[in-house]
Amino acid sequence: MRMPASSAAVPLPPPARRTAFLSDTHIGSKHCHAAELAVFLETLRCDRLYLVGDIVDLWWLSHRRAHWQASHQRVIEALHALRRAGTDIVYIPGNHDRPMRRFCGLALPAMRVRRRAVHVTVDGRRLLVVHGDEFDAQTQFGNLQERFGDWLYYRILTGNQLLNRARRRVGMRYWSLAEFLKRRSDAAERYIERYRQAGLSEARRRGLDGIVCGHIHRAALEVRHGLVYANDGDWVESLTALVEDHDGTLRLLSHTHATLARIGPRPVFTPALPSENSLAA
């Protein structure tokens, strides 16, 4: 039987996740895509949520004009709703919310604050969870060229925001100008590779199976030399998050919950049964 033309299929809610990881939301700053972040959080269901640094941009709020709109408050309310629904929230401060680090080790009413954490997936993988600014000394040079890069990046983010505002008006999906330009910069790609290697080296030094981080605003999910490298991205450029399914699958998600990259669960080792020949021997 044909359905009436007026009836439309209701989209199914995203599946519940075991764990979710978010970083670099930069709430309170000009470049935060707070409306998209609020919708993502309002449709997210997870047992545990790691906030992996630079969540509220205290640096921006203290150095520049505050930029707190209704959409930013909606993000905070969505986090409170998750907590009330039973989600365990772990906050790992970054460099833009550094003052939160004085509360590390304490269990606050709404969340636990940690300097770093080791997350154990349901299939037994042990992942270091850090913001990633601790690797800056190994990846940056601190010279005039770098400071100019920071200035240019700020201008690119402003252009990215204006471009996507125009795209929304004509019904086009989000597209990151900043990501497009960074991928065409050899210097940016070299920096990102240094950062990736520094994170993996730290996970290897600690005897862990990989790392979950943020900081550099480049989402990624891959296996390098047997170790998981997961960067959950940001909400000023990529609009991404990392999640763990209840079977241990890791997924990099877009702001619409679409899967961008995936690493399946660790195979369960089952000893091989001896063959007839080996039994006879």
Image (cartoon, rainbow, N blue to C red):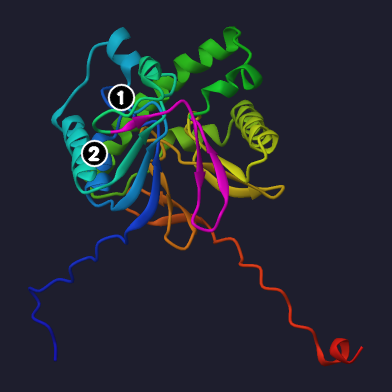
Task: Tell me the residue that label 2 is attached to.
Answer: 79
Which badge, 1 or 2, is on the more N-terminal residue? Answer: 1
Query: Which residue is depicted at the point 36% across and 56% down?
Result: 17
Q: Quadrant of the C terminus?
A: bottom right
Q: Is residue 271 above or below residue 25?
A: below
Toward the viewer: 264 or 270?
Answer: 270
Indicate left or right for 24 with 70 as reference.
Answer: right
Toward the viewer: 5 or 147?
Answer: 147
Find out whether residue 192 is within the magenta segment: no
**Where in the figure is residue 229, as x and y percent of width and height?**
59, 43
Which segment did they paint magenta? 111-130
Q: Residues within 10 Å of mark 2 (few under 14, many from 20)?
A: some
**Where in the figure is residue 275, as x and y percent of width and height?**
81, 88
**Where in the figure is residue 137, as x and y percent of width and height?**
62, 16
Q: Quadrant of the N terminus?
A: bottom left
Q: Is residue 161 above or below residue 269?
A: above
Task: Tell me the residue that label 1 is attached to.
Answer: 56
Q: Is residue 9 above or below residue 39?
A: below
